[in-house]
Amino acid sequence: MEAPIHQLHRSVCRQSRFSAGFTLVELLTVMSIIAMLATISYPLIGLVKDRQRLGRAKSDLDALGLALEHFKLTNNTYPEFVANNKGLSAFKDDARGYSDEKKSSEALFLALAGWHNEIGEELEFAGSGKGNDSRPRGYINLNDFKFGAEISGRELRKQLENLSANKPLKPAGIYFVDPWKHPYLYKYPILPNQQKLDIRRREDFVLLSKGQDRKISSSSSQSYNSKTWMSSEDAGLDQSEPGNDPNIDNVIQGPSPSG
């Protein structure tokens, strides 16, 4: 039996009202709520990311510090960084860091990756057409770190892929970077008299990240500039903070909570 026409009309009208969708007021209300939630959550997301970067930087510094100790056990000393070492690349001062800062990080990378010896001299490998060994014996897992370079991203990836080859070629212009894409800074020896192997009396190195603010507070260098990292014994460290005393061996300074 067919339904009366007036009942069918009511059913169609009822369905059309339910399928009409949201009204403009309802849509504006939902959008306002979403905007409010986004406004509230955005600072929290930024805080979480900052803490993640801080944790990653400290983890990197710990891993690099352990690799340096391994290097010392093998070579009886930490790898030296000398800014005028001809085996290092020529860098430019830019937003990522100053030339000497990048050089110090490159020197650390080449030593811990097994390409340079303790005094910054290039080791010989069959991959470069010299020596008998085909691969360098490094002290780190390269996959655990991020790297920077003054070359295109494609060329950087190409060099990093080359390092896993059977006979890799020496990388050029690559250095460790922290979560803010600035070079990790490394300095050894710290004291002038450490530069002579025969009179080295102190075994100190400095390894640190400048953090988000790209600066190192210092009691002797109030304004951090391109010459600070190589200017004095304290390497721009704030000697007033616990753990940054230049008389304490193996200073490893992570970025401050504010920076």
Image (cartoon, helix red, strand yellow):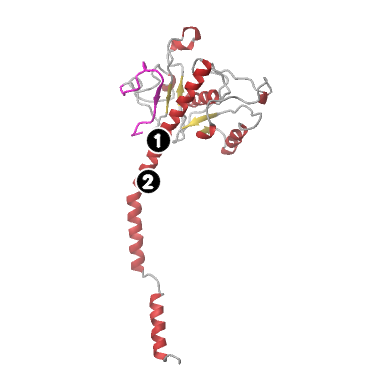
Three-letter code, disc 2: Ile
Which amino acid type is marked by label 1? Gly
Under tag 2, what secondary structure? helix
Q: Which residue is mark 1?
A: 55
Residue occupied by mark 2: 45
How many numbered circles are shown?
A: 2
Which numbered marker is on residue 233? none
Choose the circle earlier in sequence order: 2 or 1.
2
Q: Position of residue 83 (x, y in %)?
A: 50, 19
Residue stretch rendered in magenta on the structure: 240-259
- Residue 150 against residue 189 in the figure, above or below: below
Question: Where the N terminus falls, by quadrant?
Answer: bottom left
Residue at 37% x, 17% y: name it.
Answer: 248
> Visible in this render: residue 79?
no
Classify residue 39 as left or right of residue 195: left
Mark 2 and mark 1: span between their CA atoms? 15 Å
Instruction: Determine the image quadrant of residue 237.
Output: top left
Identify the secondary structure beneath mark 1: helix
Question: Crowding at label 2, few (<14), some or many (≥20) Cα neighbours within 10 Å?
Answer: few
Mark 1 closeness class: few <14, some 14–19, many ≥20 residues within 10 Å: some
Residue 156 visible? The answer is yes
* In the image, residue 67 above or below residue 48: above
Q: Main secondary structure of the magenta part?
A: loop
Outermost residue to the top: 198
The quarter holding residue 129 reads top right
